[in-house]
Image: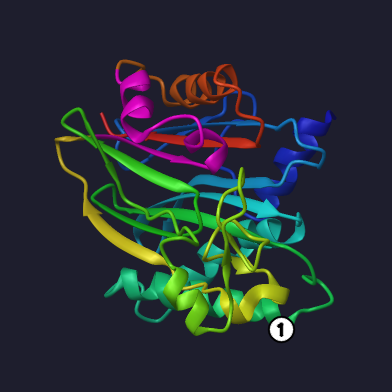
Amino acid sequence: MTGKEILHKMKEKVGLCSSDPDSGKGKSKMSKHVTHGFHLVEGKSNHAMEDYFVAEFKQVDHHELGLFAIFDGHLSNSIPDYLRSHLFSNIINEPDFWTDPKNAVRKAYEQTDAYILEKAVDFSHGGSTAVTAILIDCKTLVVGNVGDSRAVICIKGKGKQLSIDHEPSVERKSIEDRGGFVSNFPGDVPRVDGQLAVARAFGDRSLKKHLSSEPYVVEETVDDDTEFVILASDGLWKVMSNEEAVESIMHIKDAHAAAKHLTEEALKRKSKDDISCIVVRFH
């Protein structure tokens, strides 16, 4: 058995992969028109791959849920790996998930972060950004995020960002109100306490007093005008705008081919970070 096959078996065991690991794609059982594809590229930085993803359709309580996520770790493999294995379960198990999914996402994000912070031995260093999307019965999309991994939806040929890039410069006041500061060194991006380039994240125990794990959450109705959604880590968004990403895959009907095209385009534009991308097509 190859390493790729072993990894796929491990993901199947914990219920995280409904996709063929060789094809990089999957599809809904409820609607043959809803498909997804993913592609990951390890960056040229001097560390192991820190991006993790979830891409699957799952039957829960007579409903179909499409579960999609990008977790972009920093100084940590264990935290994004834990999020991949547990965050969606925590969301779905919230008592009000079916009646108020947005609130369920908020509560699960904060409770998951609290658990990570309590387990200091297991998660003592680093943290992770996250962007998650839950497609409920192919009709409703609930997106949450902390950090700078991003979700962009295409409706009638136009891109619309569903997440918020939680930048230290934008959230300077709340960081300072918690006792932290935002650095602005020449040639560098703004950083919380001179260290972290995002204002919200899971983990980051040493900075947590000055950081938030509260997600931005939005609900979007999927209708006949909805074409596709892109979820990607900042390795893509550092070198491509929302409009460029949407336009570059507008006519690529295969979701996996679209995700692969985006990662390859980011590499052409000299992105050196890990690049993870999921595309969900609705028509």
Residue 61 in view: no
Q: Quadrant of residue 6?
A: top right
Q: Is residue 242 magenta-colored?
A: yes
Give the vertical position of 160 relative to 67 (above or below). Answer: above
Residue 128 in view: yes
Residue at 46% x, 60% y: name it.
169
Give the vertical position of 278 relative to 212 (above or below). Answer: above
Range of magenta residues: 227-250
Position of residue 163 in the picture relative to residue 175 (left or right) = left
Residue at 76% x, 79% y: name it.
119
Residue 175 at x, y percent in the picture: 51, 75
Q: Amino acid at mark 1?
A: Glu
Residue at 57% x, 28% y: name it.
24
Residue 100 at x, y percent in the picture: 28, 74
Q: Which residue is mark 1?
A: 118
Please state, as top left, top right, bottom left or bottom right, where the N terminus lies in the image.
top right
Q: Quadrant of residue 20?
A: top right
Number of numbered discs:
1
Instruction: Give the camera-side residue of 283 and 216.
Output: 216
Please state, as top left, top right, bottom left or bottom right, where the C terminus lies in the image.
top left
Q: Using a 10 Å C-alpha cutoff, classify the residue at mark 1 as few (fewer than 14 neighbours), some (14 to 19) or many (20 or more).
A: some
Q: Is residue 30 magenta-colored?
A: no
Residue 202 at x, y percent in the picture: 60, 67
